[in-house]
Amino acid sequence: MARSLHERPEVTPEREAFYDKIDPLAVAPLWERLFTFMKKEPEMRAAPYVWEYDKIRPSLMETATLITAEEAERRVLILENPALKGETAACDSMFAGFQLIMPGEIAPTHRHSPAALRFIVEGDGAYTAINGEKAPMKPGDLILTPSGVWHDHGNLGDEPVVWLDGLDIPLIRFLGTMFTDLYEEGGTHPEGRPKFDNMARFGANMRPMDYETEGPHSPVFHYPYEETRSALVNLKKADEIDPFHGIKMQYINPHTGEPTMPTLDCYMQLLPPKMVTQEYQSTATWLYSVVEGTGRTVINGTPYEWGPRDVFVVPGWLPHRHECNDEDAFLFSFTDKAVHQKLGLYREKRGNLSR
Ligand code: 1HN
């Protein structure tokens, strides 16, 4: 007799009548459900996808004629996974969106339990303030707004500024741990610590004596691209290229060595010209933002082409490899890997995996 973990047992008229009979009791037979979710290996609901920046940009700019950043609270176009229509999610566990802020605009102060990251895509002159401390945003910079901190954005420059927002929204919604507050009904937070304070305090391989942590997230909230890029370029000189990842560096909490935030773990990777990585798969889902270079990521046998400012998603447990074209490629990525690891659920596989 076939076992019912992966396949549905026969439905006889007697069984069906029984299932109908017990339905009003709010009970149901497990053997009619097991095969629907006890998959041999993970099957994510999200599909692989590339959001092409050049195709989206005109519509993103048009949003500025429809609504102000202030009225919208955050003027963001959601990067919504085509397999998750209406769910405000780029993948099963994470949100992604392009946020636009025009010269002179502000996005008012608020705080929420979801953690967020900003990865700057275009434009100069904007800032994110965390508890009133301003971090200037330049393309390629990573800025964190961890769970619970007051934050606002503004554009003091003379050009539109766009960044990729990454949040753990689907996870927070699922856990039922959503809290949000407006700062004094729409006002902005008063000036906090001086500009660059967080980097000075924690970013020089030092920390204040007897420092006590303010939470499970990095006390540094600004990681400038200039420094990130230079680290990777210098590592390339050592010629130690990981066959699965090229040169891939994790952004860390300098106080603990842990990921930037408990739910969002961030990376920058350099793929040298013509590099084709070996196949790799992990339970973690990865969202990528291309900074420089062009190439493709072959996910479960299908190529997804990318170039600068494009965003793409590699849902969990799909074998994939990256192929770089003729110039160095720099890929920023963020993932739910740290959550899997904390819960003891993380798995990965390396080598010829394509089915
Ligand atoms: C949010 O608060 C921001 O603070 C960005 O900039 C994107 C997406 C969903 C929900 C809240 C921000 C967001 C968001």
Image: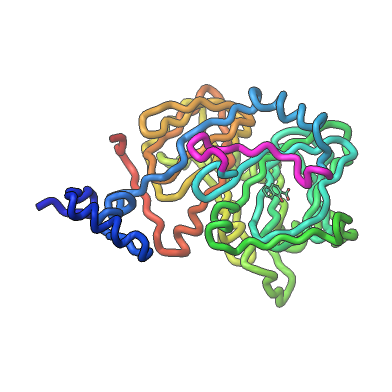
Who is closer to the viewer here, 276 or 309?
A: 309
Between 96 and 217, the residue placed more toward the observer is 96
Q: Report the residue at 31% width, 35% height from top.
A: 354
Residue at position x 80%, y 38% in the image:
101
Q: Which residue occupies the foreground of this view, 31 or 77?
A: 31
Q: Vertical placement of 328 versus 104: above or below?
A: above
Residue 20: image location, x then y, percent: 30, 55
The residue sitting at the bottom extreme is: 210
Q: In which quarter of the image is residue 72?
A: top right
Residue 331 seen by the camera: yes
Quick check: 93 above or below 132? Answer: above
> Left or right of 18: which side holds 154?
right
Magenta range is 70-86
Residue depicted at 40% across the width and 39% down the height: 243
Q: Confirm whether residue 218 shows in the render.
A: no
Number of numbered markers: 0
Q: Is residue 324 above or below residue 141?
A: above
Quadrant containing the C terminus is top left
Tell me residue 46's x, y (percent).
46, 41
Q: In which quarter of the image is residue 203?
A: bottom right
Reply yes or no: does residue 338 show up in magenta. Answer: no
User: Residue 307's spot in the image, x, y percent?
Assistant: 58, 26
The residue sitting at the left extreme is 1
Quarter of the image for residue 340 reads bottom left
- Identify the residue at horizontal 78%, vertical 55% (top origin): 151
- Residue 352 x %, y %: 30, 37
